[in-house]
Amino acid sequence: MYFTELFPYKRDMCKTWQGLICETEAMITNRIFRMRIIFNLFSLLLASGLVTDLSAQPVIISGNAPSYAGQELVFNTIADYISGTEKELGRGMIGPSGDFRIEIPAENTLQVFAALGVFKTFLWIEPRQEYRVILPEKVEKSPEEVLNPFFEPVEIQLAIENFREDELNTLIMMFRDAYNPYYNKHVNDIYTKPQAGRIEADIDLIEKSFSNYTNTYFKAYRFYSYGQLKLLANMQKVSSIAQEYFNGKPFLYDHPAYMELFDQVYDKYFTFLGRSDAGKKIYSDINQFHSYSSLLKTLSEEPHITNDTLREMVILKSVYDEFYGMEFSRDGLLSILDSLILTTRVSMHKQTGMIIRHKITRLQEGYDPPDFTLLDADSNRISLKDFLGKYVYLNFCTSSSYTCLNEYKLLHDIYQRHHKKLAVVTISTDPYDSSFDQFRSKNNYQWVFLYYGHQPGVIKDFDIRAFPTYFLIGPDGKLIYSPAPSPSENFEIKLFEAMRARGDLN
């Protein structure tokens, strides 16, 4: 919004096309002076918070969904497309009648997500817009689906009541409907010789229906979607795609089509590069010398990574891809990542590097485990940091597991012998908190019991695939054993070894 709209003042208009002089020089000077005063005053008001920055108006997502009444609706976006880590943007309660209205800060176009039972809903939002959405029919996850780390939600694009044909969500939906049949057709032909002319003709045919739409985000969405089609149909080599779509092009960190193509082109790039004579030096750069500068020099000789920003992006992705592989030293990769975080001039790369570092080390011995805040049987909020200064024997169990029930007796003995230095913490994964409460009331176990249902993501954070699973955390809050031995697997011996190594065993 311009100043003239905020503070309108009388303007003298020219009366003829010949351009009669409308104002004297003195009047113009006076007007400029007044506008400067207005600008300075407006800036002061913005700085003081008495006037809101009009460009920062939030996006509004509203609607009515009676079947979700009383439920909290949380919208996330992708904080880092390399690791797929999400961050929260906004949340709000759905009222008794089903009405909801949630404000989301958005300075640029974003794809946002909301988990609703078995569904993962998504929507594109643009700054300063309001979307009245229609939520899908409510279908809750079963207790088994909640506990299943491999559960894949049904992805569904939210319908918009106040849609327009030229609105971004409508455009992307129409484009996907036109694009997907061609994508499927060419992927089915992946083992045959690619027909470049045929693919280009199909792209031109799709593009005819959308070339008149000028939305910048939508143009980029189409452009990088076509790149995915060319790559998967073997029409162009990876180096050719990299040259056409990434060298010298803007970096679209928040754009899913851009990042999906980037992910495909540079998948496990370090391994790919190491197979060539020119690139095999990468192994000594990482495994032997742990040298970020040497790695940059090696990558600078690659013709399809022609600038520092793209090189950093490739390094970030490759560290994440290769960390759990067998080709490269984890210490070397972490050293490379730490050097990038410290030296990069791109704030997004620093943020992405820190996210990746946390994600790849979260269950590594010697690093901080994922944090959580859960309720105990008395509704107290308990976090891992509450146990700093003590060893923590953390375990995930369920009262329906025979092994868990048997080992509770051994846990009781361990707690009795070592509770002055060792906290025993059980996270119960019973399907319902009522069964958790019943189990607690029938037993007199004195250690800490927490219920996972208040933060079900803790199961995924700790990569729990079987019950029981154990971890030992040191007094400094870092993992000692991940996973740790169970009580029946000589846990106490391993505990004594850890205490002795740290000088905590008298």
Image: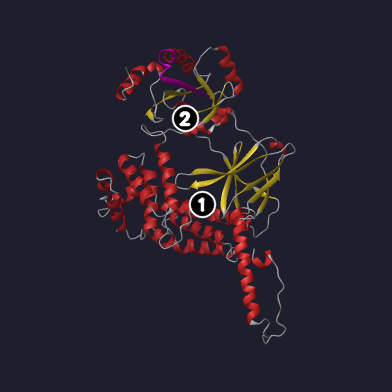
Residue 177, can we see it?
A: no
Q: Residue at x 51, y 52 (%)?
A: 256
Which is more foreground, mark 2 or mark 1?
2
Which stretch appears magenta? 415-428
Residue 34, can we see it?
A: yes
Q: Whole-percent x and y of residue 59?
A: 63, 51
Q: Which mark is residue 484?
A: none
Q: Quadrant of the C terminus?
A: top left
- Residue 502 higher or lower than 226, as above or below: above
What colour scheme does the image use? secondary structure
The earlier-in-sequence mark between 2 and 1 is 1
Whether residue 207 is in magenta: the answer is no
* Residue at numbered disc 1: 256
Classify mark 1: residues with Cα within 10 Å, few (<14), some (14-19) or many (20+).
some
Q: Whole-percent x and y of residue 97?
A: 75, 38
Whether residue 420 is in magenta: the answer is yes
Q: Residue at x 62, y 77 (%)?
A: 29
Q: Whole-percent x and y of residue 26?
A: 64, 80
Task: Give the SS element for disc 2.
Answer: helix
Whether residues under marks 2 and 1 lie with C-beta atoms below 8 angstroms apart, the answer is no
Residue situated in front as seen by the camera: 150 or 354: 354
- Residue 231 left/right relative to 286: right
Residue 442 position by quadrant: top right
* Residue at numbered disc 2: 385
At label 2, which amino acid type do we have?
Lys
Q: Whole-percent x and y of residue 482?
A: 39, 28
At label 1, which amino acid type do we have?
Pro
